[in-house]
Image: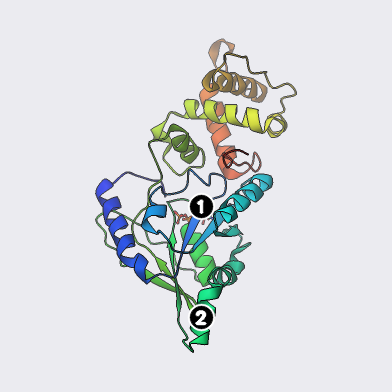
Amino acid sequence: MNIQWYPGHMTKTRRMIAEQIKHMDAVCEILDARIPISSRNPDVDELTAGKPRLVVLNRVDQADPDSTAKWASYFKGKGYAVLESDAKSGQGTARFAAAVRELLEDKIRAYEEKGQNRVIRVMILGIPNVGKSTFINKIAGRKTAKTEDRPGVTRAKQWVPIDKNLELLDTPGILWPKFEDQSVGLNLAYTGAVKDDILDTETLGCHLMAYLGQRYPQALSAAYKLPDIPEREEEENDIAWGYRLLETAGRKRGFLISGGDVDTERMAKILLDEFRSGKLGRFTLELPEGV
Ligand code: G4P
C-alpha cells in the first residue's frame, strides 16, 4: 500500500497507541532493512517510552548483508533486541517468540517466581510497506488477507495469538514516516512506499543512479554492462551525475529517441522497476551515523 497523507487519521492512531501502551510488555517495531531510519515513525520513541523494544529488520533478502549487520549492531547498541527477517519467504520469522522471551527474560522469570502464568503482550508497529502484514501472518501462521487501513473505516484493534503465552496487538491506523526530510522522501519513493507521483520518475532515477554509482558502482556496471561508469566531476551534483549515468545506461540498452538522444525517462522507469524487484541486486540506502 502506498502512503497517503491524512493528518486527522494520524492523530487518532497516535492516541490509540498512547492508550494501549500501558498494557504492553514490549514493542515490536518493523523496519525496512534497506532504509532502517527512513522507515521509522519518528514518534515511536516518544509514544512507547521505556518499553522494551524488539526491532525487526525486515526485507533482509533485498538489503545488502554487510549493511544489515551494521544496522543490527547499531540497534543492539541502543539496548534493543533485533530480528533479521524476510517475511516473504519466512526466513528469520520463526525466531520471533524466542527473541521476545529473551528480551523479557527478567520479567518472565519474576512472573514465574510468583507463580503467575501471564500472557506476554507485544504491540507491533510499522509504517506502510515495511511488510508488517506479511510478517504478522507468518509468525501467527495465518493466511488471512490483509485488512486495509483506510481513513474513515474504523478497524478494531486486533489481538493476534502467537502461542499460548504470547499475544500481539496489531494497532489499527497508519503510522507515517518523517516526510519533511528530502532524503527520507527519496528513500521511501525508491522502495515504492510512496507513490511515484511525489517526484517525477526521471528525477528519482537520477538520484538513485547517483547513490548506486557512488556506493555500489560494481553492481551498477554489472547490471547495465557499463565497463566504464562516468566519473563524477568535482562540481557535479547528484542530479547532473545521475542524469549522465542514466544516459550511459539507456544508450547501452538502446533506448533512443529521435535525434539520437537517450530516452532517460524510460531508463529511469526501468531502473526503479529493477531496483524494486531485486533484479539489480541487494542494496541498503542508508547507514548508521559514523559508519
Ligand atoms: P505492510 O503491511 O507493511 O504495508 O506490507 P505488506 O505486508 O502488505 O507487504 C508489502 C509487499 O512487500 C508484499 O508484496 C509482500 O509480499 C512484500 N514483502 C513483505 N515482506 C517482505 C520481505 O521480507 N521480503 C520481500 N522481498 N518482500 C516482502 P506484494 O507484491 O504487494 O504482494 P505479494 O504478491 O508478494 O503477496
Please state which of residues 120 and 267 is positioned toward the viewer in this rendering. 120
User: What secondary structure is marked by label 2?
Assistant: helix
Question: Residue 107, percent across and down?
Answer: 50, 75
State left or right for residue 182 relative to residue 93: left
Question: Residue 244, percent across and down?
Answer: 59, 18
Question: Residue 187, percent across and down?
Answer: 50, 38
Question: Residue 119, percent across and down?
Answer: 45, 79
Residue at mark 1 = 31
Task: Identify the coloring.
Answer: rainbow
Residue at 40% of width from left, 59% of height from top? 48
Residue at 39% of width from left, 34% of height from top? 198
The kind of residue on which mark 2 rests is Ala
Looking at the image, is 142 positioned above or below residue 178? below
Please state which of residues 68 and 291 is positioned toward the viewer in this rendering. 291
Q: Is mark 1 within 8 Å of ligand 1?
A: no
Residue at 54% of width from left, 80% of height from top? 109
User: What secondary structure is marked by label 1?
Assistant: strand
The kind of residue on which mark 1 rests is Leu
Looking at the image, is 30 positioned above or below residue 195? below
| Label 2 close to label 1 by CB (< 8 Å) | no
Q: Give the mark nearer the N terminus: 2 vs 1.
A: 1
Report the quarter where the C terminus lies: top right
- Residue 110, labelled with which disc? 2
Residue at 58% of width from left, 39% of height from top? 275
Q: Residues within 10 Å of mark 1 (few under 14, many from 20)?
A: many
User: Hey, which quadrant is residue 138 in on the image?
Assistant: bottom right
- Residue 228, labelled with which disc? none
User: Hey, which quadrant is residue 216 in on the image?
Assistant: top right
